[in-house]
Image: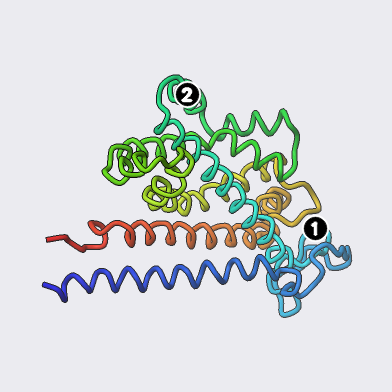
């Protein structure tokens, strides 16, 4: 029986290690992108425009003669870091707001929950497009637009988790020990509800990356000549039949990166949930 319990856990641990390795590689590419690009991703050479993939340009060149591989590598910095920043903002801000609602209750809880209902009533991407259109293009504005519609998920999750642990004996003991509300939240509540929040954040990275790429595709995100995968696909969509490599390069980068982060989120969820990884308490 003990051996059967260990096998699922060992398998999940190996998967988590593999996910961590792949995620680390993506982050390293994003961090050291300027050192990894074979060409200057912003240097134009009209004489080399729209060259097919070759030994000199592994992913070909775009309409301005820029090396597509170099722009894909440089685009990792913009796309990955913007997605991570967005998830960090909505996870930290939304979770803290949810914990406050669960702990304080009353009018604060009612107002915030009704406000979250209001945001959830609108189609997310449509609302983000409207917000981005109002405040203007740019990657920072795209992050703000998506953050404005994505926080309710974390607020509701954190609120529910807080209500579940609010009456636990260790919380009662902390209150009797004259801990301040902030001490209780940071020392006792947040550490005990962090698991579901981290899993949700890991699963959201790929989703946010797709939505940021979607806004850039609509010219509401990264602006030329910034190397960003969604923007690159937008500029090359008219050449999908004549020069498909201009779109396939950034498109495959999005696909691969989202796949890795989704795999990381699923594996992290299995690792933190004994029932999913096959471990039983009896």
Q: Residue 58 is drawn in which quadrant?
A: bottom right
Assign a secondary structure to mark 1: loop
Q: Residues within 10 Å of mark 2 (few under 14, many from 20)?
A: some
Which of the 4 image quarters holds residue 101? top left
Is 150 situated above or below 47?
Answer: above
> Residue pushed farthest front?
177
Nearer the observer, disc 2 or disc 1? 2
In the picture, measured across the screen, residue 131 lies left or right of residue 88, that is right
User: Is 210 on the left or on the right of 144, as rendered?
Assistant: left
For the C terminus, the image quarter is bottom left
- Tell whether 101 sits left or right of 150: left
Mark 2 → mark 1, Cα distance in angstroms: 54 Å
Q: Where residue 235 sits: x, y (%)?
A: 73, 50
Task: Point out residue 188 in the picture as x, y percentages from the top left corner.
Answer: 39, 48
Q: Is residue 107 left or right of residue 255?
A: left
* Disc number placed over residue 108 in the picture, else none: 2
Which residue is at the front of the view, 175 or 275? 175
In contact (CB < 8 Å): disc 2 and disc 1:
no
- Which label sits on residue 113? none
Q: Quadrant of the N terminus?
A: bottom left
Q: Nearer the viewer, residue 112 or 139?
A: 112
Residue 164 screen position, x and y as percent: 30, 39
Seen at 22% across and 73% down, the residue is 6
Whichever of labels 2 and 1 marks the residue nearer the N terminus, that label is: 1
In depth, the one of 65 and 100 nearer the eye is: 100
The residue under label 1 is 63
- Outermost residue toward the bottom in this view: 55
- Secondary element under disc 2, as helix, strand or loop, is helix
Where is residue 278? Give x, y as percent: 21, 63
In the depicted structure, whether residue 204 falls above or below residue 266:
above
Q: Residue at x 62, y 46 (%)?
A: 212
């Amino acid at each position: 029986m003990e051996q059967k319990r260990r096998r699922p856990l060992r398998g999940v641990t190996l998967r988590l290690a593999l996910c961590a390795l792949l995620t680390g590689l993506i982050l390293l590419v994003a961090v050291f992108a300027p050192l990894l690009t074979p060409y200057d991703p912003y240097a134009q050479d009209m004489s080399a425009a729209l060259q097919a993939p070759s030994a000199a340009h592994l992913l070909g060149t775009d309409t301005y003669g820029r090396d597509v591989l170099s722009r894909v590598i440089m685009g990792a910095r913009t796309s990955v870091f913007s997605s991570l920043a967005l998830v960090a903002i909505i996870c930290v801000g939304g979770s803290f707001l949810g914990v406050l609602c669960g702990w304080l209750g009353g009018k604060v809880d009612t107002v915030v929950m009704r406000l979250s209902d209001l945001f959830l009533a609108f189609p997310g991407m449509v609302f983000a497009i409207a917000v981005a259109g109002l405040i203007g293009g740019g990657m920072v504005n795209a992050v703000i637009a998506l953050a404005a519609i994505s926080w309710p998920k974390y607020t509701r999750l954190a609120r529910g988790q807080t209500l579940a642990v609010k009456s636990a004996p260790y919380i009662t003991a902390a209150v009797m020990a004259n801990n301040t509300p902030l001490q209780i939240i940071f020392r006792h509540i947040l550490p005990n509800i962090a698991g579901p929040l981290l899993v949700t954040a890991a699963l959201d990275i790929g989703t946010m990356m797709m939505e940021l790429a979607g806004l850039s595709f609509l010219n509401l995100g990264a602006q030329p000549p910034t190397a960003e995968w969604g923007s690159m696909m937008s500029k090359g969509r008219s050449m999908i039949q004549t020069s498909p490599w201009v779109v396939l390069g950034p498109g495959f980068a999005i696909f691969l990166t989202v796949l890795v982060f989704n795999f990381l989120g699923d594996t992290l969820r299995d690792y933190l949930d004994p029932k999913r990884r096959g471990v039983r308490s009896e």
